[in-house]
Image: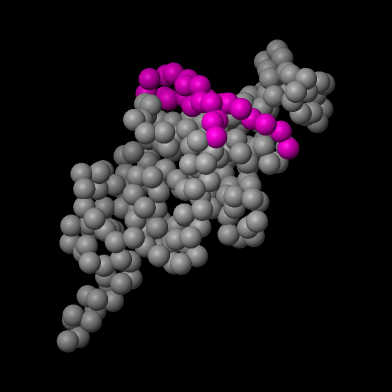
Amino acid sequence: MYLEEDYIMISGIQHFAYCKRQWALIHVEHQWEQNLYTVKGDIVHEKVDDPFLMESRGNLIISRSVPVQSELLGCYGIADLIEYHQSEQGVEIPGKEGFYRLYPIEYKAGKPKDDNIDKVQLCLQAMCIEEIHNIKVPEGAIYYAKVRRREKVVFTQELRQQGENLITEMHQLISDSTTPRPSYSKICDHCSLYNICLPKSKSKYESVDHYINSQIAEEIR
């Protein structure tokens, strides 16, 4: 169990999977810059984000920008969209007749990735929904704007375990106030924090504060 003030943003696993140092700079040292890739992501989400809006399309109900959280995992986030399909195995919705099965959908600006981190992110949202409603959410989908296609995601035990392991590791870094050391690779060139991290010039320094203090020490010698 985690205290609410210790909850971690589910979306942060994207940064964590991309580069653990990048994630630590954002969430441990609170550094942030935007680039073309992050701006594109914001634009896609603007089309989805409309808190507390519910639409009805026949027997289908759609809810956008739904807050989710898990006390067990110590994480929280926003489900871009949840579809409610009529099902006797589902849950009741205030003001609506019958029972509904919940089907979370995540929106992404790009196209399907080679890794499964998008699926892990969606799976963590589903695990939060399960805890909130005391139900099982077996599957969901990811919509990729670049290819305009929805991809079905089955929440396997392997996917669930991977998500839980990542969240646990993130909690540990925050607890230890640890920022991994920089190590340059090609992915650094497109990083939104490149000018803050400077991976080529300060590989021996862990945190930004450590680097700044070392430069001050050099000046006063």
Q: How far from the left and from the top, in percent, is residue 204?
A: 22, 67
Relative to residue 62, is residue 217 depicted above or below? Answer: below
Q: Which residues are magenta?
A: 134-157
Relative to residue 96, is residue 169 depicted above or below? Answer: below
Q: Quadrant of residue 156?
A: top right
Give the residue drawn at x 34%, y 60%.
180
Q: How far from the left and from the top, in percent, is residue 121?
A: 49, 38
- Tell me, yes or no, whether the highlighted magenta stretch contains residue 142: yes
- Tell me, yes or no, whether the highlighted magenta stretch contains residue 179: no
Q: Hey, which residue is sitting farthest bottom in the picture?
A: 221
Residue 197 or 6: which is nearer the viewer?
6
Q: Is residue 135 left or right of residue 122?
A: right
Q: Quadrant of residue 157?
A: top right
Can residue 199 be seen here? The reply is yes
Residue 61 or 47: which is nearer the viewer?
61
Q: Is residue 112 left or right of residue 105?
A: left
Q: How far from the left and from the top, in percent, is residue 206?
A: 30, 66
Give the residue drawn at x 61%, y 27%.
138
Residue 57 or 102: which is nearer the viewer?
102
In which quadrant will I find the C terminus?
bottom left
